Amino acid sequence: MSLLIKYVTRYPVGIIVFAQLMGGSIWFSTNGVADQLLVAWSLSTSELGYLTSAVQLGFIIGTFVFALSGLSDRYKASQIFFISCLVGAAANASLPYFSHSIESALVFRFLTGIALAGIYPLGMKLIISWAPNKAGFTLGWLVGMLTLGTALPHLLRSVGADYSWQTIIVLSSLLAVVAGIIIYLLGDGPHLSNNAKLDKNAARKAFKIPAFRAAAFGYFGHMWELYAFWTITPLLVMRILENFTEWSSSTYVAALSFVIIGSGFIGCTVGGYLSHKWGSKTIATIALASSGLICLFYPLVQSLPPLLLLFLLIVWGITVVADSPQFSAMSAKACPKNIVGSALSIQNGIGFLITIISISLVTSFYENICVFVTWILLPGPILGLFFLHRKNAITIGTRLAATRSQEITGT
């Protein structure tokens, strides 16, 4: 056991991002088997959206509890991550065994979302605790792995086409358990300390910092687009393939959905690398502008050949999430070290609250306006760019935050 712990702690950042990949697999586990659930439970497209929204709602409540109570900064992130993985795996695995309708499924998806609140934001805090000076780069890998984790159920579905949806769900739960064990063995890094007592005002303190506000509101615009796009990706793929009988099976839809969503890994990691040269703000701006343009033009280019449409969706998949780690990096840098966990949790909580609205809108309107639902996503990138560049708040606020941090820490 000691040899295993020694090996795990040798590559902490790699271990954390790998655990994020496996822990994040329970997030969109039902979307990976959407075609089977639509038949098994006689669901409509909007009801499928409810399953995703239930996860988001649970995640939101969980992050609010962590942020507003100060728990994210009071206890070790590795311990919270471990417990959350076990709880999330249990809730996710309960779906095929104890749920036989949309009503009971919503309960288990809600509980899964609560558990994810201890996986995603706390994973970001773990990264910063091990490598605080490379936040843009390391968070790029972390969010990239979360993106692959989100896409993973689609891959499991495509390679295990003959597997039941119940098997796919259980497999994703097992991955989450492994993730929790790995992080428990790793522990927290040396660069962030836990508060001696709960600070229930940590989230409020964060929003008083101009740089944090600018990054957070830019992130909120980004979130309006991101998860709604991921939710309708299989529907957009099905529409492209509907005229090609040999390619329209659920196996190909799942495989292509994995490629499109999973391509966000490229955007996150490449963007993280380039952030060292160009800065997080520049990378976030390029990503937001690029995905916004695709939002605008995608419904207008449906006459393009199917391969070009699929390529456009892949480019969208790359750009739609590339800005996410950069917003988190800017937010973390803007805050004093002793409130980073709470700040990231509240930012995530509000961001995911926004996703419930956009997911509900696109899944409700898709059957009526089809690909034109992408225009519903367009306000996200537009508002995100507006807040990100409003009065150069990040540049000015970062200097103020550095001064405040020095005052608080006495350095």
Image (tube, rainbow, N blue to C red):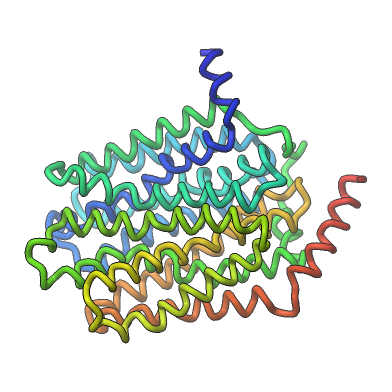
With 282 as the anchor, is 251 left or right in this view?
Answer: left
Residue at 43 percent of width and 50 percent of height: 113
Residue 62, percent from left and from top = 52, 51
**Where 292 falls versus 347 (above or below)?**
below
Circle count: 0
> In the rendered image of this protein, does residue 117 appear above or below residue 367?
above
> Who's the residue at 40% across and 49% down the image?
148
Residue at horizontal 47 percent and vertical 32 percent from the top: 180
Q: Does residue 157 appear left or right of residue 149 in this picture?
A: left
Left or right of 113, for residue 92 = left
Q: Residue farthest to the bottom?
A: 300
Q: Position of residue 169 (x, y in %)?
A: 27, 43
Residue ID at (20%, 44%): 159
Return the residue found at the far left. Answer: 245
Question: For residue 310, which quarter of the picture?
Answer: bottom left
Measured from the top left, where is residue 23 in percent x and y? 43, 41
Q: Nearer the viewer, residue 163 or 39?
A: 163
Quadrant position of the C terminus in the picture: top right
Q: Residue furthest top?
A: 2
Q: Quadrant of residue 129?
A: top right
- Location of residue 383 (image quadrant): bottom right
